[in-house]
Amino acid sequence: MKSSLLIFIILTFFAPLTDFNDTEKEEVAKAVNEFTQAVVNADEAKFNALLSEDLVFGHSNGSVQDKKAFIQEIVSLKPFDYQSVEVHEQEIQISGKVGVVRHIYAAKAKNQSNQTVDIRIGVMMVWVKNKSKWQLLSRQAYKL
């Protein structure tokens, strides 16, 4: 009887938190997808909505950019014009208003010589909920 009551209490109080957490994970996953599409489309307006003003964007070569420099690089199509971006093995963890995303980033792009380049790196992103929308605060890539 006591164990049944304990299970009932756990399900009653903690099940809604699981649903909330799943909803938040889905929202962050959607934001990641919108980000990857913005990379392919070089969509400055989408980046302005998705990226925090305090963005710290770390590349796998060690360079770091702020929001303005990152957007400028992508929309200039230099050094790469992204043809496709996919994420694999994505894991999302939510802690309050912070979402931590880890995944493998796989892209095809054209370089300045118009040659196709395959990019495959590991990525960790930190998303923050600002009012009702998730924004990318920080991203760090690393070589695999």
Image (cartoon, helix red, strand yellow):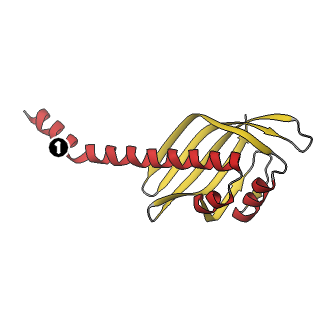
Amino acid under label 1? Ile
Quarter-of-image position of residue 54: bottom right
Whether 19 is drawn above or below 75: the answer is above
Q: Residue at x 26, y 43 (%)?
A: 15
- Number of numbered callouts drawn: 1
| Left or right: 31 as drawn, with respect to 115 | left
| Left or right: 1 as drawn, with respect to 94 | left
Q: Quadrant of the C terminus?
A: top right
Q: Where does label 1 land, which residue?
A: 9
Q: Position of residue 32 (x, y in %)?
A: 57, 47
Whether 28 is drawn above or below 128: the answer is above
Q: Residue at x 58, y 41 (%)?
A: 102
Q: Residue at x 21, y 42 (%)?
A: 10
Quarter-of-image position of residue 51: bottom right
Q: Position of residue 111 (x, y in %)?
A: 86, 42
Q: Position of residue 27 (x, y in %)?
A: 46, 49
Q: Position of residue 100 (x, y in %)?
A: 53, 48
